Image (cartoon, helix red, strand yellow):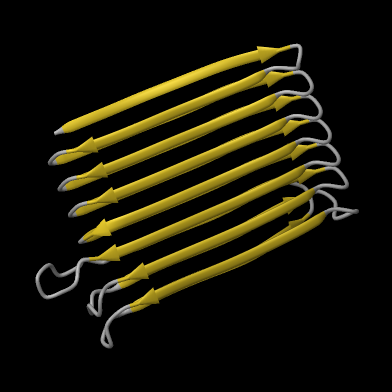
Amino acid sequence: MVVFALMSSASAYYGGNTIKQSITMTGTGGDISQSASNAAVVVGNNNNVDQSISQTASGNHITQSAANAAVVFGNNNDVNQGINQRATGNTIGQASANAVAVVGDFNTVGQSINQRAIGQEIYQSGWNTGTIIGNGNTLDQSVNAFASTYTPPAVPPADPSQTMSNTAYIMGVYNQVNQGITGIVMTGGSNAPVYQSANNLIETRDMYRNSYEQGIMINVRAGPLAYVEQSGSNEIRLGPW
């Protein structure tokens, strides 16, 4: 078994800082476990925060988990969170999460998750969550997952599953939120069941002069007798949190 675990954290004050947190993992073996996280707290104006995690693995049983977390107090900050996971194996589990909280005005936040897996039994989950309190902020959230199973009958696939979500909590005016989800599962004509779930949610105290966009695209290519379960929802809730 190969096990990797890394964590980084940072704090910055007074403004004008550039913070870059990057973790890259590559593993080849039998049973592989990769775990990584970045965390940052920023107080001040005109800061640039970049958090990225990259995980690549090839083996038999593979588990990948990654998380970015940032808290920002101030104005005119630029925050980017990105997670990329790639795996080739037999049983594959991929889990990713980005979380950010921003208090201030004219901040730009980007959250992205990209997952790709080729194997027999595949489970993928990706979640972005952002909280913004202030005016004139921009939040972009995206989750992209791709799963491909080996062509039967040599190796029959077993129940590939994708769970993807974006969540945003907004308080203020002149804010813009863009949420996008793409999920693709290809089982090579197998009749194994496939499950996909995609959810975008925006909760806001006031719709006044804010701009929101939500989009979902999920696709399954399976055999003629396969049970395919797909669920998707775009939701905007207006009122107190």
Numbered circles on residues, count: 0
Rendering quarter of residue 101: top right
* Image location of residue 22, percent across then percent down: 47, 27
Extreme residue in the bottom direction: 224
* Image location of residue 26, percent across then percent down: 29, 35
Tell me what residue is drawn at x 63 percent, y 65 percent: 215
Look at the picture and state if 58 lies above or below 145.
above
Look at the picture and state if 50 lies above or below 91.
above
* Image location of residue 179, percent across then percent down: 64, 56
Is 14 displayed left or right of 219 in the figure? Answer: right
Tell me what residue is drawn at x 69 percent, y 17 percent: 17
Name the one closer to the observer, 14 or 166.
14
Q: Is residue 15 visible?
A: yes
Is 91 displayed left or right of 64 in the figure? Answer: left
Look at the picture and state if 223 lies above or below 231.
below
Extreme residue in the left direction: 154
Is 136 displayed left or right of 185 in the figure? Answer: right
Q: Is residue 160 visible?
A: no
Rendering quarter of residue 178: bottom right
Name the one closer to the observer, 206 or 17.
17
Rendering quarter of residue 103: top right
* Image location of residue 77, percent across then percent down: 75, 29
Is 134 displayed left or right of 55 in the figure? Answer: right
Tell me what residue is drawn at x 25 percent, y 80 percent: 189
Q: State the quadrant of the N terminus.
A: top left
Tell me what residue is drawn at x 76 percent, y 16 percent: 15
